[in-house]
Amino acid sequence: MKIESLISQYERDAATARSAESRAREEIESIISEAESEGRSRLLESEDDRCEVLFSRIDSAKAEIAKAEDNVNRLKAVQAEEAQNELRLTEFRSTNAGRLYGAGGSYRDDSPRWTYLNDGRSAVVRSDQRFGDHELVREYASRESERDKHITGTYANFAQQIRSLSTSGASAVVPTEWSFPIIDKARNAAVAFKAGCTLVPMPAKVVQIGRLTTDPTATFRTEGSTVTASDPAFDFVQLQATTLSALTVASMEFLQDAPDADQVVSEAIAKAMALELDKAILFGQLGATGTNDEGAAYALASPYPKGVLKNLLDNASAQVLGFGTNGTAHTAATPWNEVVGAYYQVKTQNEMPGAIVSSDKLVQQYNSLYTSFNNVIDKPPELRDVPWLTTNVIPSYTRGTMTSRATDLFVGDWSQVLVGQRLDFTVRVLTERYAELGQVGILSHWRGDVQVARPKALAVYRALQGA
């Protein structure tokens, strides 16, 4: 039963008890008035017994009123907290997707103007935009509104839907008003989106995004000569959805009792999705490229989408630097050469690096570099205004004699990395697998794809020495 219905029930109980108390008092007053009208100073024994019964009813009614009011106040407090949780659930912190940093760290928006090939509409969820605010996603939500009304009319919120499914082990589509904020929370948590990846809503399993491959050119001409026509050339990027699943485990008591279950469960699902999305975006389909590199642990074969590193290896191998037999150790005289080299590997392709992404271990290594006077060796000027983001899905691995310290560094214009996002989000609650532990598993399914529109807009320096 929804909280609103319970509050109404308890308020009716309190009203019924007040009415019973009022009738009992009126009857007592009637008995006393009758005795006074007959000139009696004492009540008859039968009247006295009746009054005792009525006083008992008054006491019971007071207890029922107090209990009902306490329940109403408690439920209203829960309702207010859930309303606050719902507000937090829909919060979206703007990512930097599609934004590059200019001089002095100021923003300039160089987002590619991606469009759907079939209708020419914008295919991009802007960095400052909720997923649910995109034109195509709004249309989808409108189409599904009748279905969603049935679900939201049955359950007060996402946590209550999970609680209900936990008794049946059924699977269900999450209503759009609850699933879209989870998608935004995953965007907030995924480092690849913070770096600037472009989110593309996918209305179908296969979606084609138009792109400009050749710009029109301008040429000088002599007076009276013919103007040479120069047409832009177009092709498309094709996104094909595959499924990513995440398992979140929670105690039955928590799901039943915690007033902020919505917030905690949705954030747990979003973080699990974000970590796996980062892994897929960076290393999808990499496979093992040797006996002692991260490919052994990150052999993310299909149906994982093809990530940045694998895409560069297949389509722009010159953008992959390093990966020496024994990795690349820092030199005291030129410790930043490798990062600068990766940065300019992108710049010399007429692309603008928007962010650097690495592991914390690599950042720790650079923060541990000192001059002979024990001063920290600062970044070169070219790198100072470029955001450096970290994620520990980038592993430390062994490369030859560099034992458990080799790691990879990614640089580029991340807006050229397209992440397709299907519009449905489903969950299944596993009731038996964790039953003996008093827990339930929440299995959630995300569907989408990753494509690199311009491989030369990114570079990777491999097997660089971390801490």
Image: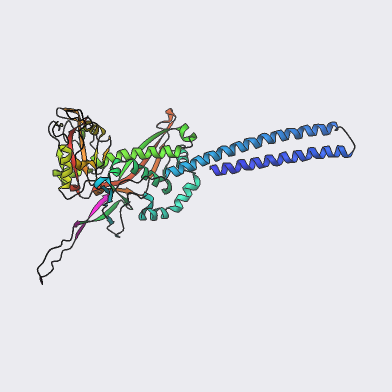
First to last magenta residue range: 213-241
Residue 283 belongs to magenta span: no
Q: Nearer the viewer, residue 389 or 461?
A: 389
Residue 220 belongs to magenta span: yes
Image point (42%, 53%), residue name: 144
Relative placement, left or right, of 22 versus 456 is right
- The quadrant of the picture occupied by the N terminus is top right
Relative placement, left or right, of 160 versus 225 is right
Q: Is residue 383 above or below residue 52?
A: below
Total marks placed:
0
Q: Is residue 284 visible?
A: no
Q: How is the image coloured?
A: rainbow
Residue 451 picture location, percent across and down:
24, 48
Residue 246 picture location, percent across and down:
34, 38
Main SS, magenta residues: loop
Residue 441 picture location, percent across and down:
40, 35
Find residue 195 and report its image quarter: top left
Furthest residue in direction right, as rendered: 39
Image point (32%, 52%), residue name: 204
Image point (15%, 41%), residue name: 341
- The quadrant of the picture occupied by the C terminus is top left
Furthest residue in direction bottom, as rendered: 224
Residue 357 picture location, percent across and down:
24, 39
Image point (42%, 55%), residue name: 142
Q: Is residue 343 visible?
A: yes
